[in-house]
Amino acid sequence: MIAGQPVAYPFPLLADEIAVNDTVGERDIVVFYTSGQASALDEGNIDASRDVGLAAMFRRELDGETLTFFVDLDGVIRDEQTGSAWNVFGTATDGDLAGGQLTPQLAAPHFWFAWAAFQPETLLFGVE
C-alpha cells in the first residue's frame, strides 16, 4: 500500500525490467529486483527449488531530488541524473551519490490470490 493505494508489481515484469520507476498518488517510488532467492515452497530441498527472486521498494527522492533509475548494458542499476550505481538495498555503491541511501517504502511479497481477496482495488502495475 502506497499513500493509501494498494498496488502490486508482478515478479515476472520486475524480472524483465530490474528497476521500475513509478508514481502512486503523489509518491515517486522505485522497485528494484534481483534473482537469487529460492522458493521455500517449490521442493523439499530449497537448493533444488526454482529461483523466484526478490524485490525491494524505495522512495525515489534523495537530498530533495527525484531520481529516475535504469539498468545499463552491464546489468547495473543507475540513476539518470548522476550515473551512480545502486544495489537492490537502495544504496549507491559508486559515482557521485556513493554512500547515499534511498528511503525504504514498506512493501512485502504476498501470494496474489490472498492479497487480491482482501485488496480488490489493487492497481496492478503493467496491466491496464
Image: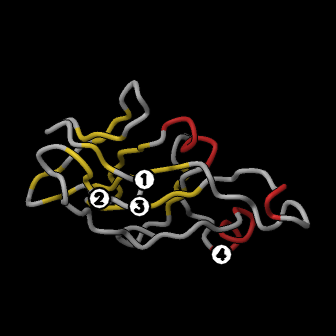
Q: Nearer the viewer, mark 2 or mark 3?
A: 2
* For the residues bearing labels 3 and 4, Cβ distance under 8 angstroms: no
Q: Position of residue 81 (x, y in %)?
A: 15, 38
First reached walking from the N terminus: tag 3 or tag 1: 1
CA–CA distance in space, label 2 to label 1 = 13 Å
Query: SS at mark 4?
Result: helix
CA–CA distance in space, label 2 to label 4 = 33 Å
Looking at the image, which residue is at 34% across and 69% down?
A: 104
Q: Nearer the viewer, mark 2 or mark 1?
A: 2
The numbered mark at residue 118 is: 4
Q: Amino acid at mark 2?
A: Thr
Q: Which residue is mark 3?
A: 57
First reached walking from the N terminus: tag 3 or tag 4: 3
Q: Amino acid at mark 3?
A: Met
Looking at the image, which residue is at 36% across and 48% down?
A: 22
CA–CA distance in space, label 1 to label 4 = 23 Å
CA–CA distance in space, label 2 to label 3 = 12 Å
Q: Residue 90 appears in which quarter of the rendering? A: bottom left
Query: SS at mark 2?
Result: loop
Q: Is residue 57 left or right of residue 82?
A: right
Q: Quadrant of the C terminus?
A: top right
* For the residues bearing labels 3 and 1, Cβ distance under 8 angstroms: yes
Q: Residue 118 appears in which quarter of the rendering? A: bottom right
* For the residues bearing labels 2 and 4, Cβ distance under 8 angstroms: no
First reached walking from the N terminus: tag 2 or tag 1: 1
The numbered mark at residue 9 is: none
Q: Which residue is mark 1?
A: 31
Q: Amino acid at mark 4?
A: Phe
Q: Is residue 103 left or right of residue 89?
A: left
CA–CA distance in space, label 3 to label 1 = 4 Å
